[in-house]
Image: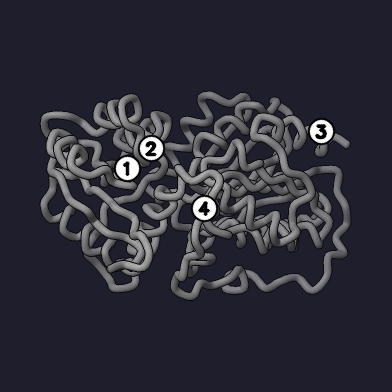
Amino acid sequence: MLTSKKLKVLIVDDSASVRQVLKEILESDPEIEVMGTASDPYMAVERIKKETPDVITLDIEMPRMDGLTFLDKIMSQHPIPVVICSTLAGTGSDSALAALEKGAVGIITKPKLGAKEFFEESRIRICDVVKSAGRVRLTKDRPRALTPAPKLTADAMLPKPESHALIRTTEKVVAVGASTGGTEALREFLEAMPLDAPGIVVVQHMPEEFTARFAQRLDKTCRITVKEAADNDSVIRGQALIAHGNRHLLLKRSGARYFVEVKEGPLVSRHRPSVDVLFRSAARYGGRNVVGVILTGMGDDGAKGMLEMKEAGAFNIAQNEATCVVFGMPAEAIKAGGVDKVMPLNAIAPEVVRLCHV
């Protein structure tokens, strides 16, 4: 008899090979149990009638009923956390992002055959996203502690600064980190920004196939410009730079000019891009000129980096529990002592603007 309850996952995908590989990946994690697989939404419904899963992984393109239609039915009739699993690019990326707007809580790309390192990193990301989805329904009870594989810190990308004696400039920079639930939280945060908003740099945990489309969708709905960050992009007023999926994003400074560096590197805090890497670079090169923001997400990525920013003179804000999809990253940042203010999501953008104009 099991001493602890495993996370029950239902895999819905029309590809038998994908179902098998995804099952093997998920069941390699001792906290996950694949309770079943289904080749289309109709078979999934029959499986759910027998036993309710904790999480569903869902393909978008399937026979008889597409994934978006099935997602609508799930959310309206029997809400269950859904993770979109897709190989689609281009317009398909739009479909996957539309799924997040409809209530899906994460995106993973279908596992590929390849080098051992690639497979291992894919396994870590896939299992983390699925476990994160399983926490979404939890509100009062704190999730039980995970025992993940050893994870690297921001030291792997950037040494911790020895001092913070930076000259204050007239320009402020906003550094933002988010994960599960962050796509919609970022949309609300960025849509509230005025045309003359301070320069913003963002790490959102998301596969590389989707970050460019995500930035493009935000650019259409926001007053400010939103784009996927490219190496050496300047951080300027009225613009937000979204970290490239699978690349770390670092804030740098040359004189009074702030710019970003997009770098390859190992997973840090089990992520690439990592919030801790961005926040450490913001502490090192921005210091008192930075306003830090940490939004909804599972895990502790960003907690150490936010404390480093505070020690360097930054003012930091965390999203409150009531408005988070998962109160993990903000809670860990608060616990670490790096947060100056805890606020509901709709109050954060006005406070950031106020702080940057003081």
**Between tags 1 and 3, which lies in front?**
1
Q: Dot 4: what SS? A: loop
Q: Circle 1 sits on which residue?
A: 84
- State the image coordinates of residue 220 (x, y, percent, origin top left): 51, 25
Q: For the residues labelled 1 and 2, say whether their Cβ atoms are less than 8 Å apart.
A: yes
Look at 58% across and 70% down and name the residue there. Answer: 153
Classify the position of the N terminus by image quarter.
bottom left
- Pick the quarter of the image with the C terminus: top right
Element at badge 1? strand
Q: Earlier in the sequence, mark 4 or mark 3?
A: 4
Kind of residue indicated by mark 3: Arg
**Residue 104 — which label?**
2
Amino acid beneath label 1: Ile
| Quarter residue 163 falls in | bottom right
Marks 4 and 3 in Cβ contact (< 8 Å): no
User: Callout 3: 10 Å neighbours few (<14), some, many (20+)?
Assistant: few
The correct choice, above or below, for 165 with respect to 143 in the image is: below
Indicate which disc residue 354 carries: 3
Q: Is residue 229 visible?
A: no
Residue at 62% from the left image edge and 42% from the top image edge? 321
Q: Which residue is under mark 4?
A: 298
